[in-house]
Amino acid sequence: MNVGDARKAFELRAWAPWQHALEDTDNMSMTEKAENIRIFVTGGAGKHSCVIPSWGMTKSVTVPVLP
């Protein structure tokens, strides 16, 4: 998606400073840095596995799960 289309579709969101510097014809990066991408796979082998994607400008929070 190019920046111009993203701005039209998501005009009410808070844009990061680096996103304001882009031209409308530039391609929109999903994140400022690769370290912001998290992939979670839960469950066991077979039909009970699950992939949980994240949408939007979210931040991950890691907390221990106690039994």
Image (cartoon, helix red, strand yellow):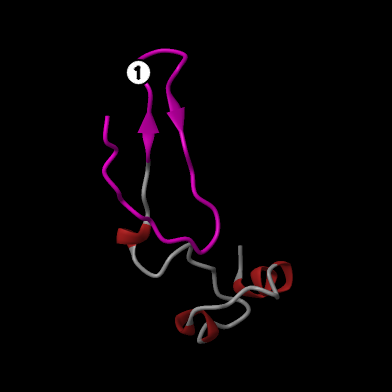
Q: In the picture, which quadrant includes the C terminus?
A: top left
Q: Amino acid at mark 1?
A: Gly
Query: What is the number of callouts on the image?
Result: 1
Q: Residues within 10 Å of mark 1 (few under 14, many from 20)?
A: few
The residue positioned 35% from the left and 18% from the top of the image is 44
The quarter of the picture where residue 45 lies is top left
Q: Residue furthest top?
A: 46
Dominant secondary structure (helix, strand or loop) of the stretch shown in magenta? loop
The quarter of the picture where residue 27 lies is bottom right
In the rendered structure, the answer to whether residue 14 lies left or right of residue 65 reads right
Q: Nearer the viewer, residue 65 or 56?
A: 65
Secondary structure at numbered mark 1: loop
In the rendered structure, the answer to whether residue 33 lies left or right of residue 30 reads left
Q: In the picture, which quadrant includes the N terminus?
A: bottom right
Residue 59, image x and y in percent? Answer: 41, 61
Vertical arrangement, residue 36 with respect to residue 16, above or below: above
In the rendered structure, the answer to whether residue 54 lies left or right of residue 5 reads left
Q: Which residue is mark 1?
A: 44
Looking at the rendering, the stretch of residues picked out in magenta corresponds to 40-67
The residue positioned 45% from the left and 82% from the top of the image is 18
